[in-house]
Amino acid sequence: MTDLTFLALATVTVASAILALEARDLVYGAAALGITFLGMAGLFFLLDASYVGAFQIAVYIGAVVVLILFTVMLVGPQLGEPPLELRRLSLLTALLVALLLGTAGSLTSAAAFPGPDNCGGGCDLTRLGTTLINQYGVPLEFLSLVLAAAVIGALTLAKADRKG
Amino acid sequence: MPDPITQIIQLVTSTYFLEIVVFPGLISIAILGAFFTWFERKLTARVQLRIGPSYSSPAGGILQGFADIIKLLFKELIIPEGADRFFFIMSPVTALIIGAALLGLIPFAPGVQIANVEVGLPAFLAIVTLSPTLVLLAGWSANSKFPFIGGLRALFQQTAYEIPLWLSALGVVMITGTLNLTGIVQFQQNNGWLILPQALGALLFIVTSTAEMERLPFDLPEAESEIMMGWQAEYPGPLFMLVQGPAFIKLYAFAALFSTLYLGGYLGPAIIPPIVWFFLKTIVIIVAVMLFRSTFPRVRLDQLLRQGWTTLLTLSIVNIVIAYFIVVGVPAI
Amino acid sequence: MVSQGIPEETGYIIFLFAATLALVITLRLVISPRDPRPTPEKKAPFESGQIASGPGRTRFIIQYYPYILMFVVYDVIAMFLFAWALDLRALGASGTVPVLTFMVVALVPLAYALHLAGQRENW
């Protein structure tokens, strides 16, 4: 049953990702991107990372896709570029990337990440906060700096752009 | 692993299937939706010294909601010129599925819950964030001016209430230390209802969730006196029913979530069964939210955005500080 | 409710599927009444009784754009605060300083952002 669910979710994710790139109407592309994120959230749920899954939906679909949709609608009714022809080079690239990811995936195991977080199947959600604060305290502070820089940067850029 | 057919037969004959289809699943959602439409019209009428719907049955027009459903269902399906058919039809349908998904997460009584997810509270709030996106798509798809303005308003409104909504629910998580909705109810069994320590949080939660439901003080996306029902303006009868459905399901789901988070959910003295307690609390919240509709004037979009990012955000941070001191204790100075 | 050994998530997916199915049936019912030759007026968009003019997707609201940008950035904060809140009892006062720094550093630019967003002539 898990395999079946995984296959269904993976198919939906990949298909909508392709649609997001190839859709002629950009609004459809943005909506397909939302479905891709939804599929990824489903994959997170399947991996028992339900916390990440819930926030994947909230942040990526609730905020990022909405921003993209807004921008696409702002730009107006122009259609996107026609889909690219499938060239031999792009096929080769796709093959290489798939090979690389496949190799990485097969090499990856729990043993590849040694350390105190490797709690196997008994991982408890309630340890998330402790780990975040005690072990990743410094990255957390840098993350807040990134957020601060992002908001000031985005507003300044958008403003300057409007003034011309 | 047993073969799939046996599994399906097992599923259909299980109590779980009954839960999905009858209660708290689909059939009860439809009936309650029809009931709430009547109830709201009657309540608003009482507030405004009118009579309200009264013809559809001897008992004060209680069947009005069902009559409306049947009427709308058999109207002609008119899709306006130049509309994007796919999003025009898919948005209300998806919104209805989202509403059903929300109710699946609520614990109605001990054991009566469709999905007891580990992260019930963030999952609920995350699923809810999808609906402004759908409203925007629906408004865009109609290729008409009022719906498009309504859709954009829904989007801007979301930016104002979303973060205070998450942060007001954060207080509950800080005190209970769990994200599971059943866990939150069980915590309240031992420690009393959370509305007392989290009074500010509860107030913020009900204000922001009213904004999320797009109900009257915050019904900017549909504002019937300004932009003619906003994003719903172009919807023909049958689809209009599908558009109105999620609004009432969301009202029901948010009232249920409020009573789960702050009023102890299904807890109560054992004189009456837990499920009745749950419904009593939920109906009190629903009546309160419906009374907002008949008492408050509509806010303007710029006021809402400004207040959302200043007052509501500040108050929700104050609420976090209160919850922090409740859990950690006030340090001796 | 795991009654007959069905995993919770699977049941939830089936629930969503059933909801979809019910809707499809409803939609099929709905399609029955039809007008073979609708007049152009019937399919025209609503514009308060006026004859519809110009393209429909105009009237853009741009002056509140900064709030969307702010929203996309600050939505992430809740995610980290939830992780901290979940463990508040175990962490006690020890987590206070990192989280307080996190919130102060992230929220101080909000004042500047709100100041910028308030200057309507920029947008």
Image (cartoon, coloured by chain):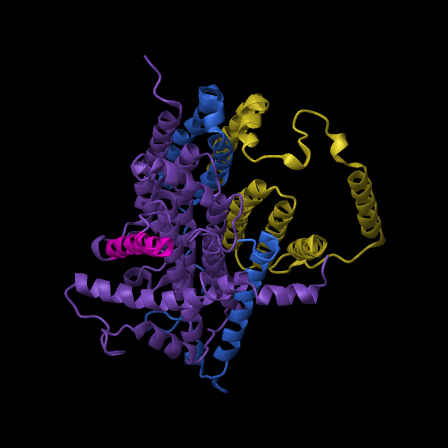
Chain for colour purple:
B
Judging depth in this view, the residue of B233 and A128 nearest the camera is A128
At a point 41% along the width and 31% down the height, the residue shown is C110
Q: Residue furthest bottom?
A: C36
Q: Is residue B315 left or right of residue B52?
A: right
Residue C101 visible to an observer of this rendering: no
Of the 4 image quadrants, the one containing the C terminus of chain B is top left
Colour representing chain C:
blue
Judging depth in this view, the residue of B175 and B71 nearest the camera is B175
Q: Is residue A104 left or right of residue A1?
A: right
B159 shown above or below C92: below
Residue range highlighted in magenta:
B271-293
Magenta stretch secondary structure, dominant: helix
Colour representing chain A:
yellow
Whether residue B281 appears in magenta in the rendering, the answer is yes
At a point 79% along the width and 57% down the height, the residue shown is A86
**Picture coordinates of residue B53, whole percent (x, y):** 24, 73
Would you identify the image quadrant in which residue B189 lies? Answer: top left
Of the 4 image quadrants, the one containing the N terminus of chain B is bottom right
